[in-house]
Image (cartoon, grey):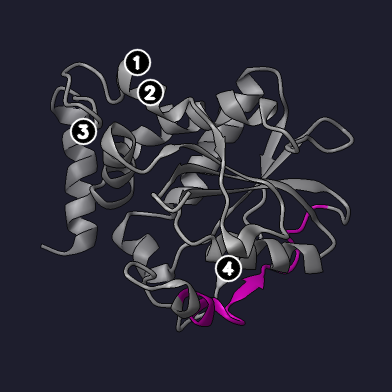
């Protein structure tokens, strides 16, 4: 079975079979309130590559129920988790130091791009889907929000799993580009979103590319951070 077929099958099973919590397995819910508490404790993330960039926050540590939920959403086709995970992001984002809306009150969210092959295998760009869900939750709470998928990866970027910091930098060097015609106005504050931060390479590179376009990356927010905190 191909990765795409496996992802589609998992998504279909989520619709047909009784739901169970991605964190602890409790039946009757995709994501129980107890496990949700593991993504409600935002902390600043410190990495050498992030020292001179915008503040970076993780909603929780990449372990236990939080890690299980991220992997279920990202790698195991449980796309329905975009709703509760997006709700967690939207609930935390407005109170993070540095994060702010634009002059007109709109929160601009920029998702970190996925490799094309990975997006196809996962049934779509999972961070873009997460950003859209977060924007919908913000809007429902009376905070206008827009998603700006203005970044793309050039061919040649490899899967970063298992790569160290130097190899990750080399992997992305010159391969994160802007999508012409999709940029918010220059000077607009934007929030960069991703699922997991490890070395901070991806966030640092993406922030730098956005800065060259005149955008102000006021904060970066991820679901989880690995143990190098």
Q: Which residues are magenta?
A: 168-184
Of the two numbered discs 1 and 4 in the rendering, the one whose residue sits closer to the viewer: 1
Using the rendered view, name the quadrant where residue 112 is placed. bottom right
Image position of 180 (left or right of 177): right
Q: What numbered label is drawn on residue 90?
A: none
Check residue 182 for magenta coloring: yes
Residue at (63, 31) in percent of width and height: 93
Of the two numbered discs 4 and 2 in the rendering, the one whose residue sits closer to the viewer: 2
Decide: few, some or many residues near mark 1? Use Cα within 10 Å; few <14, some 14-19, many ≥20: few
Residue at (40, 54) in percent of width and height: 124
Determine which residue is flagged by label 1.
Answer: 33
Determine which residue is flagged by label 4.
Answer: 152
Q: Are marks 1 and 2 in contact (CB under 8 Å)?
A: yes
Using the rendered view, name the quadrant where residue 221 is placed. top right
Decide: few, some or many residues near mark 2? Use Cα within 10 Å; few <14, some 14-19, many ≥20: many
User: In x, y percent, where is residue 70?
Assistant: 34, 42
**Spatial separation of the CA atoms under disc 4 and disc 2:** 30 Å
């Amino acid at each position: 079975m191909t990765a795409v077929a496996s992802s589609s099958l998992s998504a279909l099973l989520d619709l047909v079979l009784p739901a169970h919590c991605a964190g602890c397995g409790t039946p009757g819910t995709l994501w129980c309130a107890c496990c949700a508490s593991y993504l409600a404790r935002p902390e600043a993330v410190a990495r050498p590559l992030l020292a001179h960039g915008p503040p970076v926050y993780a909603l929780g540590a990449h372990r236990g129920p939080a890690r299980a939920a991220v992997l279920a959403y990202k790698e195991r086709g449980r796309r329905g988790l975009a709703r509760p995970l997006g709700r967690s992001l939207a609930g935390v984002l407005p109170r993070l130091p540095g994060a702010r809306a634009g002059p007109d009150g709109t929160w601009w969210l920029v998702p970190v791009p996925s490799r094309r092959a990975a997006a196809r295998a996962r049934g779509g760009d999972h961070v873009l889907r997460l950003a859209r869900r977060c924007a919908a939750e913000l809007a429902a709470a009376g905070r206008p929000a827009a998603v700006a998928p203005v970044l793309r990866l050039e061919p040649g970027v490899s899967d970063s799993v298992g790569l160290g910091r130097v190899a990750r930098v080399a992997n992305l060097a010159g391969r994160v580009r802007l999508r012409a015609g999709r940029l918010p106005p220059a000077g607009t504050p934007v929030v960069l979103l991703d699922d997991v931060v490890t070395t901070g390479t991806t966030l640092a590179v993406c922030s730098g590319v956005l800065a060259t376009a005149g955008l102000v990356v006021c904060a970066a927010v991820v679901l989880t951070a690995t143990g190098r905190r």
